[in-house]
Amino acid sequence: MSSPAVATTSQPPTTDDVLLRVDDLYKHFPITKGLFKRVVGQVKAVDGVSFEIPEGKTLGLVGESGCGKTTTSRMIMRAFDPTSGHIWFRDRQLGWVDIPELGPAELKRIRPDMQMIFQDPYSSLNPRMTLLEIIGEPLLVNGIARGEELRDRVADMLRRVGLRPEYVNRYPHGFSGGQRQRMGIARALAPHPQLVVCDEPVSALDVSVQAQILNLLQDLQAEFQLTYLFVAHDLSVVEHICDRVAVMYVGKLVEVADTEELYLNPLHPYTEALLSAVPIPNPRLRRDRVGVGAPESSVSTNGQRAARIVLQGEVADPSNPPPGCPFHPRCPYAVDTCKTVVPRLRELKPGHLVSCHRAEELHLQGVPA
Amino acid sequence: MSAPAASVSQPSALNPQPVLLEVKDLRVHFPLDEGLVRAVDGVSYSLARGRTLGIVGESGCGKSVTAQAVLRITPKPGQVVGGEILFHQRPGETLDLAQLPPDGRRIRAIRGKEIAYISQEPMAALSPVHTIGHMIVERIQLHLGLDKAAARDHAVDTLARVGMPRPSQLIDRYPHQLSGGQRQRAVIAMALSCRPSLLIADEPTTALDVTTEAQILELMKELQRDFGMAIQFITHNLGVIAEMADEVVVMYLGKEVEYAPVDELFFNPKHPYTRALLRSIPRLGRKSRERLESIRGTVPDPYSIPRGCAFHPRCPFYKPGVCDDPQLVQVGERHWARCARTDEIGVVA
């Protein structure tokens, strides 16, 4: 795989297994002030992001709140227009299209092929619509089905997501969070999309229901050959469901790798800190020492987790990111170069991209297998 | 139903350390138009000085209502209808908080001073029109009787203690001027300003990012070591429980289904619900794309709690006639479970 970071071409990918390719994507929101909306600054929500997703695979996009992961996914859905950059999508009817360049007519034709599953199963379903109307709407507006056929397809979709087909005339009121999320999934999958953007699909659900929904998403992916962009902050969920993971920090990708590689051998100090911060449901692995940045030789011994790396300070302000590497004020390994030179995302090992000046020399701890 | 509170094997009788809080068969009911909601229906535990008790469960299981009952801040129309909340303030000085009027002088002297509370959403705990300093100073003046200047010094010290950057400046900030992590630090500083002996933390890190969560959890452990307070930690996250708790209460639909030391709970769970929960969570370091073992069905709504064992419609071990009225039974030295079939359900690693 060539490094997407250096791809400056605006040509569509030539490989046929890729479904979506994001090329050097930027989104800057202006900060305005006063009566005349004078622009006084820019929030660099997404600042040069590139990745691709092969067909039928799942890419996880992880990072903390405000890192730009939701903005990225909304640009792919064309809810926002990017400031610059390309989003190449291989539509089954139109072939390769650059989503930000599409006019209204073409956009409407590709809408059924890319759908979204939302985080909150309460606010994402209209309480005044029946399930037939909710799940049937994407079929109706895209002219895919109507009348009796519409009803049959909605009932079929309900069955596939594990709900009873008799529910078609009921309202979402009175259903549990897990059942509502199944409705949201049914709505997204009803027009048989190629790409599904899942924005934190299980983070609002109860623990005992999360597993059901994750299993359902995997089953449906196999059944319909779906491609997922899985936006989440929970690293254990991401590890479970994703083939490849991209880690974002203050609008930039800091590391991209296959899931197992990223979790075992993280190359970016931010990834290491994120993995180390996840509370592990095993009291015998409890770490009892307060870490102020890990010593560079911290190696885990006999499967035990080494001392937790507790990052100091806060996530950088995207309207005023620090010079050099945006992570350097919190990075325990930062040297002078990191404060001035912005690191580029580069392919250090085959398929493993990282943007850190010191990636070769650091020996970071991953998750013990 | 036989009263578990009167039985000899009461869960609240076995901590080796001096006990600070004993809750016995607590019941909190909400008479609503839709029916009577038994939000907490038989919860017993004890918490020793300087230790951490975790209460874990899914939404609607009654874990927050339990915490509110201890503070006597149960929202109306909820009422503590049964049980005891014994607070051993000083040796030989025991108060049953359940008997105190919720707005009386005695509970108000304890609330905020002896027992402090941290809520899930720091923004809801902070007044948007007061500076954080104003709120902390007010509490210190009220409970410790210091004058304004001394109270302010004490507040700055406490803010510094919880790792607030530039405390003498940030003390004059309003909550909206602070980041999420700083707000939660301010709330913790407010809670700890009067050196409570018991801190009740209700999902204190749920609204935070994972790196901020790590900061706050480490901070709470450090402050517990230094101040020696007991913590009642409420969360739905089993990872946080494993990291923080010494003993754990598992709740399901208002009932305490299991009570055990943390290692025992994770490696020798006795209740089918606990077992299922532990197996259904995705864990770091597992082979990815494996199927998770999920619990069938969903948590029922509080107006139609299943008869008999509330977990039985989702339980793989349900046996008609056996699971009608399970009691909290002792299954190990310091281990209780509310299940009629613990003997037949094998030990899980």
Image: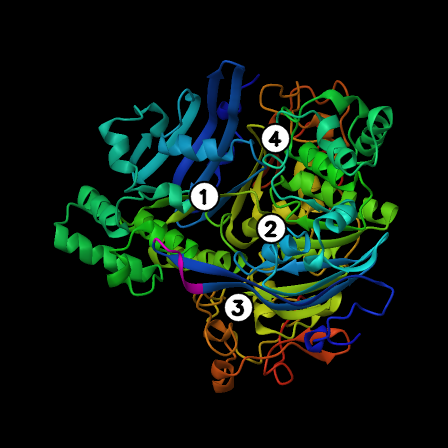
Which amino acid does the dot numbered 1 rest on? Gln
Q: What is the number of the mark on residue B120?
A: 1
Q: CA distance from mark 3 to mark 4?
A: 41 Å
Kindly identify which chain the residue marked by label 1 belongs to.
B
Binning the other alpha carbons within 10 Å of mark 2 as few (below 14), some (14 to 19) or many (20 upward) gives some
Residue B320, percent from left and from top = 77, 20
Q: CA distance from mark 4 to mark 2?
A: 19 Å
Which amino acid does the dot numbered 3 rest on? Ile
Q: CA distance from mark 3 to mark 1?
A: 24 Å
In the picture, residue B152 is in which quadrant? bottom left
Kindly identify which chain the residue marked by label 3 belongs to.
A
Q: Which residue is pictured at 79% across the width and 26% down the height? A: A164
Residue indicated by mark 3:
A309
Residue indicated by mark 4:
B329
Residue indicated by mark 2:
B263
> In this rendering, which labeled residue sits more in front, label 3 or label 4?
3
From this viewpoint, is residue B158 visible? yes
Which amino acid does the dot numbered 4 rest on? Val
Q: What kind of element bears circle 1?
A: loop
Q: What kind of element bears circle 2?
A: helix
Segment tinted magenta in the rendering? A35-41
Closer to us: B318 or B157? B157
Binning the other alpha carbons within 10 Å of mark 3 as few (below 14), some (14 to 19) or many (20 upward) gives many
Q: What kind of element bears circle 3?
A: loop
Residue B226, percent from left and from top = 35, 59
- State if disc 1 and disc 3 touch (CB < 8 Å): no
- State if disc 2 and disc 4 touch (CB < 8 Å): no
